[in-house]
């Protein structure tokens, strides 16, 4: 006799549920809004930490930096603020996700994947800012210097949009 095996998708969800706190709540209609709000709050909190790192970078370079360099740093700050602001409220189009009694496992897997990608993007952006912060003074070519951070912000925005589309498609 062989032991009972769960379908691969279910096992995948249960394993990954430990990586994203509260993910199990997505399965329960009564907890979906709360879990979504917690994820959004976590992302906004991490974005605020990134903003602090950008401010520290600006302060670090302010003595030697040109106006153009300070403008480049300020542009990144504005972008991170805009991303954080876009997360304040759950998307209106996601009503079906929050109200449906049952959400297909495949949809939950896709939403979980999007959540994990968003968290990974934040971690990568933090790493980029740490690398940039190792520079004592502003480099000459800031556009290329900030390219890795800009790329991470592109990924983050793309994954947040993907997540909202997934929530809206349920």
Image: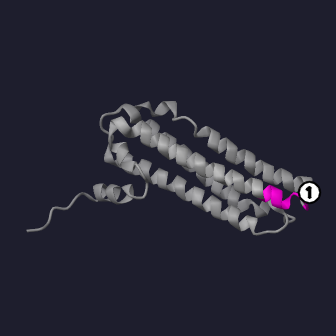
85 inside magenta stretch: no
Helix, strand or loop status at disc 1: loop
Magenta residue span: 57-64
Q: Is residue 6 left or right of residue 103?
A: left
Colour scheme used in the picture?
A: one colour
Query: Residue under circle 1?
Result: 66
Residue found 63% across the figure and 43% down from its top: 84
The image shows residue 99, relative to residue 152, as above or below, that is above
Among the 4 quarters of the image, the one containing residue 141: bottom right
Along the horizontal axis of the image, is 82 left or right of 28? right
Please tell me which residue lies in front, 124 or 106: 124
Secondary structure mostly taken by the magenta-highlighted segment of the chain: helix
Please state, as top left, top right, bottom left or bottom right, where the N terminus lies in the image: bottom left
Count the marks: how many?
1
Q: Residue at x 51, y 55 (%)?
A: 117
Q: Residues within 10 Å of mark 1 (few under 14, many from 20)?
A: few
Rendered image quadrant of residue 139: bottom right
Question: Residue 147's x, y, as percent?
Answer: 73, 60
Place of residue 97 in the rendered image (x, y in percent of width and height, measured from the top left): 40, 36
Residue 31 position, x and y percent, is 37, 38
Q: Position of residue 159 (x, y in %)?
A: 55, 50
Left or right: where does residue 87 sit relative to residue 108?
right
Q: Please, is residue 131 above or below residue 28 in the view?
A: below
- State the quadrant of the C terminus: top left
């Amino acid at each position: 006799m062989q032991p009972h095996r769960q379908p691969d998708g279910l096992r995948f969800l249960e394993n990954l549920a430990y990586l994203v706190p509260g993910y199990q709540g997505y399965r329960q209609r009564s907890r979906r809004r709360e879990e979504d709000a917690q994820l959004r709050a976590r992302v906004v909190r991490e974005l605020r930490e990134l903003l602090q790192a950008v401010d520290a970078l600006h302060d670090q370079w302010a003595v030697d930096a040109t106006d153009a360099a300070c403008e480049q740093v300020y542009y990144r700050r504005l972008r991170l603020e805009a991303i954080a602001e876009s997360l304040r409220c759950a998307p209106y189009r996601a009503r079906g996700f929050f109200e449906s009694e049952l959400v297909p496992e495949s949809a939950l897997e896709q939403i979980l994947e999007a959540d994990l990608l968003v968290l990974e993007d934040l971690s990568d952006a933090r790493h980029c800012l740490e690398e940039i912060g190792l520079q004592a003074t502003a480099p000459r070519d800031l556009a290329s210097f900030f390219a890795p951070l800009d790329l991470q912000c592109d990924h983050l925005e793309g994954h947040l949009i993907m997540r909202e589309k997934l929530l809206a498609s349920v």
